[in-house]
Image (cartoon, rainbow, N blue to C red):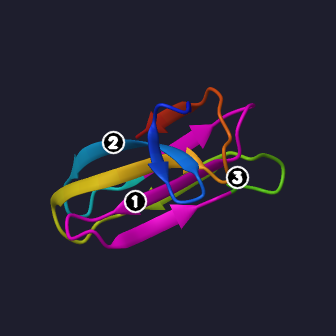
Amino acid sequence: MSTTDCVEAGPYYSDRYFIYLKAGESLTVTMSSAAVDSWLELYDSGGNRVAANDDRDDFTFDAQIVYTPRVAAYYRIFARTNSSAETGGYSLTIR
């Protein structure tokens, strides 16, 4: 995450990913970082937020979304920081 990424109000830096999901096919997205407090959001093709997560568990600042769509469509994944003006590396896993 860097200051040249997309900027949300705050400022919160974010990267955006697009993915096509089939109806009934489960999606797991995990954002892991030792540098930033991870935050994930998933939006449907209509711009509605369908899932979000700040902390996957009580022990890390990693974020994870598990989602099964009811309709096949393109979805947007927002990988961003949970704290204002944070920068640093992260890994994103999509399964």
Q: Is residue 46 magenta?
A: yes
- Residue at the farthest left position: 72
* Coordinates of residue 95 in the picture (x, y in percent): 40, 40
Q: Mark 1 falls on what kind of element?
A: strand
For disc 3, the marked residue is 83
> In the drawing, what numbered circle is on residue 81?
none
- Residue at the farthest top position: 89
Q: Tell me which residue sits at (25%, 45%) in the image.
A: 19
**78 relative position to 62: left or right:** left
Q: Mark 3 falls on what kind of element?
A: loop
Which marked residue is nearer to the observer: mark 3 or mark 2? 3
Image height check: is 60 above or below 45? above
Question: Which image quadrant for residue 71?
Answer: bottom left
Q: Mark 2 falls on what kind of element?
A: strand
For disc 2, the marked residue is 17
* Coordinates of residue 26 in the picture (x, y in percent): 36, 56
- Mark 2 neighbour class, 10 Å CA radius: few under 14, some 14 to 19, many 20 or more: few
The magenta segment is 28-54
- Who is closer to the viewer here, 3 or 45? 3
Image height check: is 57 above or below 1? below
Q: Amino acid at mark 1?
A: Leu
Find the distance from the CA under tag 1 to the CA under tag 3: 18 Å
**61 relative position to 29: left or right:** right
Find the distance from the CA under tag 1 to the CA under tag 2: 10 Å
Q: Tell me which residue sits at (71%, 46%) in the image.
A: 37
Q: Amino acid at mark 2?
A: Tyr
Which marked residue is nearer to the observer: mark 1 or mark 3? 3
Find the distance from the CA under tag 3 to the CA under tag 2: 20 Å
Q: Is residue 59 magenta?
A: no
- Who is closer to the viewer here, 26 or 49? 49
- Who is closer to the viewer here, 84 or 29? 84
